[in-house]
Amino acid sequence: MKQIIKSIIKKIPPLYNFLIFQRKKLIIKAEKTQYILKRWRELFDEELNIENPKTYNEKLQWEKIFANNKLAKKCADKILVREYVKEKIGKDYLNELIGTYENTKNIDFSKLPNQFVLKATHDSGSVLIVKDKKKIDFEKLKEIERNLKINYGHFSKEWVYDDIKPQIIIEKFLESEDGKSLKDYKIFYFNGEPKIIQVDLDRFEGHKRNFYDILWYRLDVEIEYPSVDYDVKKPDLLDKMLEVTKKLANPFNQVRVDWYIHHNKLIFGEMTFFHGSGFGKFNSREWEELIGSWFEVSKDLSYQKGVKCAE
């Protein structure tokens, strides 16, 4: 019965989005550790090993509860991270910025290009892709406006988002030659080295993802989404992608750095410190433990122990 009611509500976007917003407010009030333990038990039907974490997801949950780092907070902010990228590797890797706004109501859409990407700066998931501004999804826009009132760090229990000022950022829309979503290259970095690369395909047409090592050998790991039954061509800019990733990720014990390739140019996407919020389901316990073994949990998320990260 619950599933039937849920499916009916989903067919009414205004009601569904309102109920989701109310649920978020309830989660915000929940104490962090207790919520994480409860959520883990619900998803994995086991107790979280928070005292002696071994797997990748367990260690991400540990860092949610115990870690903190000012530089990581800066890099989670979609506006401030642009300053960090410019300082570390140069402005040429940044996507074109069209504008920043206090909220969606302050946007004069008549002055925007026909295509663009609109994002909230303070959370994960508040994204609106506009391919024709005559056909803007205003229901999605309302949802993003509501999300500006939510402290996403308190909702997700990911402290990197706690202090970010909610704003709207609009960037250039990047499209592949075949009209589909660009491949999204996500490089997982641990203790000084890039280790594996996640390639997201058709994110808005039928999401799939493959994993490769840094020499571009395909790996048999899956996290949350299935892989495709063909190999993704090794990108010509892979070596450069790995090089600039190390420069951006070096201060941290672990981070994921995302990239796009558009017209043979490398474009920075974002930096993520809690992949899948530490709840992504693996197809293999062995892989989850192996990836977890690649880094030590750290209260300051700093790769070099005792070294303070610049703010």
Image (cartoon, rainbow, N blue to C red):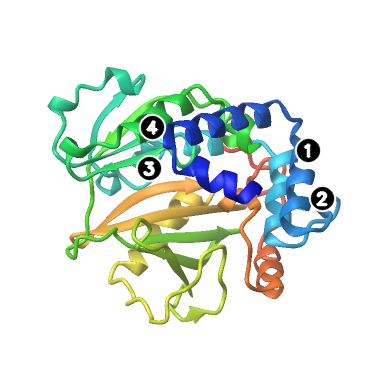
In space, the residues marked 2 and 4 are separated at their CA atoms by 33 Å
- Three-letter code, disc 3: Val
In space, the residues marked 3 and 1 are separated at their CA atoms by 32 Å
Please state which of residues 163 and 304 is positioned toward the viewer in this rendering. 163
Give the label on residue 79, or none.
4
Q: Earlier in the sequence, mark 1 or mark 4?
A: 1
In space, the residues marked 1 and 4 are separated at their CA atoms by 29 Å
The residue located at (41%, 31%) in the rendering is 144
Label 4: few (<14), some or many (≥20) within 10 Å?
many
- Three-letter code, disc 1: Thr
Q: Earlier in the sequence, mark 2 or mark 4?
A: 2
Read off the residue under disc 1: 33
Give the label on residue 85, or none.
3
Q: Of helix, strand and loop, which one carries label 4? A: loop
Question: Residue 244, image x and y in percent?
Answer: 39, 56
Question: Residue 179, image x and y in percent?
Answer: 20, 60
In space, the residues marked 3 and 2 are separated at their CA atoms by 33 Å
Q: Are marks 4 and 3 in contact (CB under 8 Å)?
A: no
- Three-letter code, disc 4: Ile
Of badges 2 and 4, the one in the foreground is 2
**Measured along the vertical axis of the image, is residue 217 above or below residue 8?**
below
Read off the residue under disc 2: 50
Q: Are marks 1 and 2 in contact (CB under 8 Å)?
A: yes
**Measured along the vertical axis of the image, is residue 90 above or below residue 180?**
above
Of badges 3 and 1, the one in the foreground is 1
The residue located at (14%, 39%) in the rendering is 114
Q: Of helix, strand and loop, which one carries label 3? A: helix
Q: Are marks 3 and 2 in contact (CB under 8 Å)?
A: no
